[in-house]
Image: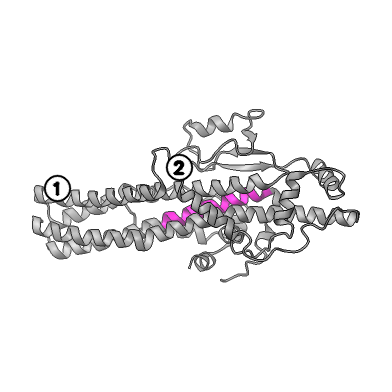
Amino acid sequence: MTTSVDNWLERIRPSRVNLAEQAALMRMQMFVTGETHRILSETAAKITQRLLKAGEGEPVDGTLAFQVQSDAALIWREALTDAWLPMIQTMRREAASLAFGSLAVIIRGVAEQMEKLTTETRKTRKPVFEEAVVEGVFAPQLNLLVQAANERIYQDGLTLSARIWKFDRDTQEGINRILMQGVQDGSSAWELAKKLEKFLGANQDCPRWTATRLYRLTKTDIALGNKTGLVRSEDCAGQGVAYNALRMARNEIQAIHHMANDAQMAQIPWIEKEQIVLSAAHPPLGCECETVVAGGEGGQGIYPKGEIVLPLHVGCLCFKIGMQPPAEEFTARLRGWMRGEQAWPAMDTFSSRYGGGVSASDPVAIALGVWLFGDKEDILGRLL
């Protein structure tokens, strides 16, 4: 990597960790958009090359269509199983890892507060958050979470594997349908190639567009929440197979991220409420998101943590912010617990689990720093 990642999590303020997490997640979505278009553009080029080489501009007959159909099926399957699916599975783990990075930042914040209180008085009930836990503390939790996400049942009754199977089948059937229709219509190889390119729906310019927005912003721009990289573009909207691939990828990344975020939020004893926030890319038309954001406590989108499950709909990019108690209230409660003057069972559990803190270089937690601050070499170096 081009830079040291050891202090990246330390650069994130605990009070802004949810915003940092959302910024990292949006960079991740931008990366997936570019990679999906790249993979499908290369797939379309290979199928087109095969078709044009075989047809040489003449009308496509049944024999030629069958030959191209077999080759196209092989090309598509290689793109799906060797490139796109491995990328998506990796990005799902990365999306879940962001929540563990946020937890590490939050633990660091309370550890610093405890250190101040310990200095104030030595009458603490027990040493807490004094030394960093060994690297890898989050890995078992991440593995269990990914397994649960894989087994999640969608509203249409399908699991992730079933949705992937359907996506694969629909794509192959679509390619076959175009080829067979071309035979009936007497289409030339060139005409069929154009129809297949449109069906796959990728734009070869999109990877360049996303890369520009991912890697040419300064670290300062990223840290300040520069939204340039999130601008919507017709070039990257996708159609056909590309649209369906991006739709599934984005939803999977959002879903597993929110599962992880809810799991980590549930562990934090001093956060009892959370606020639902509209994403910067939220469309102007009314939807369920706006109803939720305008509801809750005081009409401010504040709910007991865990009550609202995100994403609220397909393509939802809204996020949650943990509502911290007033500083004086939290400090007083923490002081009472440390002195043994006030029972706090949830804090007992939290302390026993993370009582040694979390290393700033935990391989799972550091994903937050890489996706928030990293450049191209940092990101690709983590994924390889």
Q: How busy is the neighbourhood of tag 1: few (under 14 within 10 Å), some, or many (20 plus)?
A: few
Q: Is residue 94 above or below residue 135?
A: above
Task: Give the quadrant of the N terminus.
Answer: bottom right
Q: Is residue 323 above or below residue 54?
A: above
For the point 77% across and 56% down, which residue is it?
111
Q: How many marks?
A: 2
Colouring chosen for the image of the structure: one colour
Magenta region: which residues?
A: 16-34
Query: Viewed as shown, does residue 275 lie left or right of 341?
Result: left
5 in the magenta segment? no
Q: What residue did someone put label 2 on?
A: 315
Q: Is residue 275 visible?
A: yes
Mark number, residue 181? 1
Q: Secondary structure at mark 2?
A: loop
Q: Nearer the viewer, residue 240 or 166?
A: 166
Question: Type of residue at label 2?
Answer: Gly
Question: Type of residue at label 1?
Answer: Gln
Return the x and y of residue 343 as percentages of the image width and height. Answer: 81, 43
Return the x and y of residue 118 as percentages of the image width and height. Answer: 86, 56
Return the x and y of residue 217 as percentages of the image width and height. Answer: 55, 59
Q: Is residue 295 above or below residue 334?
A: above
For the point 64% across and 46% down, which residue is it?
265
